[in-house]
Amino acid sequence: MSRFLRFAVLMLLVSCGGNFSAPRNLDNACSIVDQRPKYLRAMQKAERRWGVPVHVQMATIHQESKFIGNARTPHRYALGVIPMGRQSSAYGYAQAIDGTWDDYRKANGRIGAKRDRIEDATDFMGWYMDQSEKKLGLSKWDARTQYLAYHEGHTGYARGSHNQKAWLLRVSEAVGERSRLYQNQLIACGKL
């Protein structure tokens, strides 16, 4: 292979960046962690550090990004055609917004942390849910209420803003159900 061709192939590989595609079969926790063992390692590390169970993390990531590392919120349009930017600054596996991500990085000395790295995203999620337990008294094992506080923020949850959003209450129920499903699956395949 010529030097130029090798260089071109190398540049193509570098420009492609990381693998941000979702695993196949998102309804099967065992399949997800078999395809992406580093996901399980990252979630187990966050569980050891923050006490948030793997299945709660998995269900939240599923809801937020469907395990797509570079997920972003949709664009907004004026008059249906004029681009107005994204709906929020949420990005990555955990869909963390800029301000909350910055708070996490400062509080934990993780200035180089990136939202599109699973290890950083799960650590962030563990930190945030640990804060939800400390500030709001929410169990780290309760995916439904943890998700409500995650979505609304600690202040919004404390004010009860989620109670006026029937769609969000339905979504949080689905997150709770998925967490229980993932827990049972991970137990059955020996991953928990």
Image (cartoon, rainbow, N blue to C red):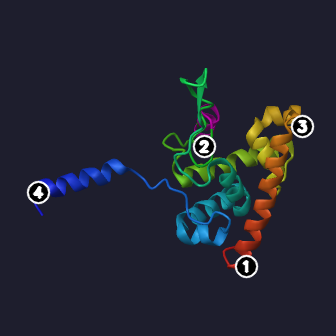
> From the viewer's perspective, is residue 99 above or below residue 173?
above
Residue type at the position of mark 2: Asn
If you read the primary sequence from the N terminus, does the residue marked by circle 2 or circle 3 appear first? 2
Main SS of the magenta part reads helix
Location of the C terminus (image quadrant): bottom right
Q: Residue at x 66, y 68 (%)?
A: 29
**Percent of width and height locating residue 137:** 87, 46
If you read the primary sequence from the N terminus, does the residue marked by circle 3 or circle 4 appear first? 4
**Percent of width and height locating residue 7:** 18, 53
If you read the primary sequence from the N terminus, does the residue marked by circle 4 or circle 2 appear first? 4
Residues packed near mark 2 inside 10 Å, few (<14), some (14 to 19) or many (20 plus): few
Residue type at the position of mark 4: Arg
Location of the N terminus (image quadrant): bottom left
Tell us which disc is closer to us: 1 or 2: 1
If you read the primary sequence from the N terminus, does the residue marked by circle 1 or circle 3 appear first? 3
Kindly identify which residue carries mark 1: 188
Q: Residue at x 62, y 31 (%)?
A: 88
* Residue 104 within the segment the image draws in magenta: yes
Q: Tell me the magenta residue range.
A: 97-105
Q: Is residue 140 visible?
A: no
Q: Is residue 9 visible?
A: yes
Q: Which mark is residue 108?
A: 2
Kindly identify which residue carries mark 3: 163
At mark 3, the secondary structure is helix
